[in-house]
Amino acid sequence: MGLLGLIIGVLLFVGLVTYHATFLIPIPSTFNPPPSNPDLAAYVSTVRTLGWISIVAMDLAVSLTVMIAWIVGGMKGEQSEAMRRGVFLFASVFLTVWLLFSFFAYAIFRSLLPFP
C-alpha cells in the first residue's frame, strides 16, 4: 500500500503540473505580438516565472499531502479502520477542493488580468 501511495503521489504531481502549466504557456505570437516595450516584456516574464514557481511548489505540496495520506492510511498498525478511511477521505476531498480552487482561481485571474 505504501508503494501505491508513492506512485499516486508522483503521478498526481506530474498531472497537476501539466494541468496548471496550460495556464502559463504563452500565446503564440501570431495571435498576440510580443510587447515592444522592454519593461512590459520583463514584467510578463517575471509574472510567468513566479507563476511557474508557484505551480511547482503548490502542486508538489498537494501531491505530497495526498501521498503521505495514502501511505499513513495504508499502514497496518494500531490505527482503527475508521481512522484509515478518514485519511483516505481527506486525501480525496483535499485533492478535489484543490483542483476546483485552482481552476477557478486561474480562470478568474485570466479574465481579470489579460497577459500580452
Image (tube, helix red, strand yellow):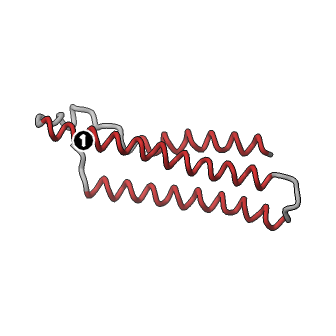
Of helix, strand and loop, which one carries label 1?
Answer: helix
Residue 55 image position (x, y, % from top left): 45, 45
Residue 81 image position (x, y, % from top left): 84, 64
Left or right of residue 94, residue 19 in this image: left
Left or right of residue 45, residue 82 in this image: right
Outermost residue to the bottom: 82
Choose top left, top right, bottom left or bottom right for residue 36. top left
Q: Amino acid at mark 1?
A: Val
Left or right of residue 16, residue 24 in this image: left
Choose top left, top right, bottom left or bottom right for residue 45. top left
Reading the image, the residue beneath label 1 is 44
Question: Which residue is pictured at 44% across the width and 55% down the height?
Answer: 103
| Count of marks overlaid on the render | 1
Residue 4 image position (x, y, % from top left): 75, 43
Choose top left, top right, bottom left or bottom right for residue 88. bottom right
The one nearer the camera, 103 or 51, is 51
Left or right of residue 39, residue 69 in this image: right
Q: Quadrant of the C terminus?
A: top left
The one nearer the camera, 31 or 109, is 109
The one nearer the camera, 84 or 11, is 84
Outermost residue to the left: 37
Residue 84 image position (x, y, % from top left): 79, 61
Question: Which residue is pictured at 72% across the width and 61% down the height?
Answer: 87
Q: Is residue 78 above or below residue 58?
A: below
Question: Which residue is pictured at 51% across the width and 55% down the height?
Answer: 99
